[in-house]
Image (cartoon, rainbow, N blue to C red):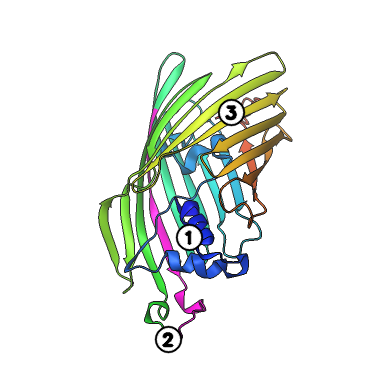
Amino acid sequence: MLHDIISNLLISLNLPKIRLMLCFCLLFVVNSMKAQQEPMYSQYMFNMLHINPAYAGNRAVDNITTLYRKQWVAIEGAPTTASLSWDRRQEGSNVGYGLQIYNDQLGIESTSGVQAFYSYRIPFEKSFLSFGLSGGVLNYRAAFSQTSTTQSGDPLFQDDVNGWLPTIGFGILYATENWYAGLSVPALLETKINADNQQVTTGANNHYFLTGGYIFDVSEILKLKPSILLKAVRGAPFEYDINLNAWIQNIMGLGVSYRTGDAIVAMFELQIFPEFRLGYAYDYTISNLKPYSKGTHELMLRYEFGNKKNQRVLSPRYY
């Protein structure tokens, strides 16, 4: 993955962190630019819409979630990601839908986009099976002209890249009251922008995500939720996230995660009101970037509009 490439470059070149911006630039100097590296969040298990479109309308309420992630603090040009999403499903309906806007910044590379989501669920007695589709457009930009190089006039750094690309995704989710499992391909197309700002579609993107989790009722005041995310990407090592979250009196959540060779994550969730939740995650870097990074901060805010007709109290969203 990207962090492994950067780590190896740091070791081999012994670059100080102030010059890491150039290292980021070099990662993308090729004949064609790949523009659909999927951004990830540490608190994905509480809002899986961005990795699985079948999750749209998972609860029969209007849900608005915003996430902001500042990765590898103290490293110039490190990833910064922000998103705002909304999804809903009417009470008694099997159709869910949603919308998401996002921006992902990595060095001189920036990706902004909008996606729409549609899901259809097949209900069973105590569970459901949901199928989801997503589609949208993204704007990919690479500001090569803003870089500083040792050789002036390098033609590879003269022209910026800026283009619009389509996105299509698919997902499946099976869930009961106590456990869930999902499989998704959030970007079915591998679409690139070449050096001439022309769109090139080369086929399947091959980003596969498998998720699963279980909720254990330990006592009346304590619930434990272990979960896992398996990630398979063509040309990269197999990766996984292992998570354990504890909910105390359905008000406060404490969690810890391990991400393969990358980070150990501490999470804190607070259900301030039945409709409003605050979440925070801190990633402690364990990769070769550890000497250069002061960790990663991630903030989540969610508001769920309850059913005004019944004025029902919302339980915390475990998945």
- Membership of 180 in magenta stretch: no
The residues tagged by marks 1 and 2 sit, at their Cα atoms, a distance apart of 29 Å
> Do tag 3 and tag 2 residues touch (Cβ < 8 Å)?
no
> Do tag 1 and tag 2 residues touch (Cβ < 8 Å)?
no
The secondary structure type at the circle numbered 2 is loop
Amino acid type assigned to the residue bearing label 3 in the image: Tyr
Considering only order in the chain, which callout, 2 or 1, is on the residue closer to the N terminus? 1
Query: Which residue is at the front of the view, 109 or 291?
Result: 291
Residue 153: assigned label: 2
Magenta range: 130-152
Considering only order in the chain, which callout, 1 or 3, is on the residue closer to the N terminus? 1
Quarter residue 142 falls in = bottom left
Residue 84, placed above or below residue 239:
below
Tell me if I can see residue 301 in this picture. Answer: yes
- Membership of 139 in magenta stretch: yes
Considering only order in the chain, which callout, 2 or 3, is on the residue closer to the N terminus? 2
Residue 318: assigned label: 3
- The quarter of the picture where the C terminus appears is top right
Indicate the position of residue 144 as horizontal and vertical percent values: 45, 75
- What residue appears at the point 49 percent right and 81 percent down from the top-left corner? 150
Q: Which residue is mark 1?
A: 112
- What residue appears at the point 27 percent right and 58 percent down from the top-left corner? 201
Amino acid type assigned to the residue bearing label 1 in the image: Ser
The secondary structure type at the circle numbered 3 is loop
- What residue appears at the point 50 percent right and 30 percent down from the top-left corner? 228
